[in-house]
Amino acid sequence: MIQNTKEIEILKGGILMSLCPVCGRAYCDHTPKERGQTEVEMTRPLTDEEQKVWEEEPDGSLKKIAVAKKHAHDPV
């Protein structure tokens, strides 16, 4: 579920960070260490699956967090 106009601009610009495996948000206050990721893993573009769940699920949903954990260490 897209939350606001700013998120639409970010989505179209393709500058999203990967989803946080702790809270399921794209931009949050969790550090790479808290996320269990490297800086590079944290700032990689969303996968198609992450983008779909980011658009369709509310922040903090268990599905969004599960997808974030699944892709937390994808090759960059």
Image (tube, rainbow, N blue to C red):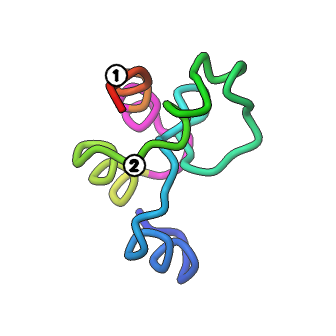
Residue 42: x %, y % from top left: 55, 35
Q: At numbered mark 2, what does the secondary structure look like: helix, strand or loop?
A: loop
Q: Is residue 32 above or below residue 49?
A: above
Q: Is residue 59 magenta?
A: yes
Task: Provide residue 20's location: percent of width, then percent of height.
Answer: 55, 35
Q: Residue furthest left?
A: 48
Q: Which one is nearer the viewer's eye here, 48 or 62?
A: 48
Q: Is residue 48 magenta?
A: no
Q: Identity of the amino acid at label 2?
A: Pro
Disc 1 marks which residue? 70
Region of the chain picked out in magenta, as a range:
58-67
Quarter of the view holding residue 72: top left
At label 1, the amino acid type is: Lys
Residue found 36% across the figure and 47% down from its top: 46
Please give the name of the residue rendered at 61% of the width and 32% of the height, measured from the top-left corner. 39
Q: Do labels 1 and 2 touch, CB within 8 Å?
A: no
Disc nearer the start of the sequence (1/2)? 2
Residue of label 2: 45
The quarter of the rendered structure image containing the C terminus is top left
Q: Nearer the viewer, residue 56 or 27?
A: 27
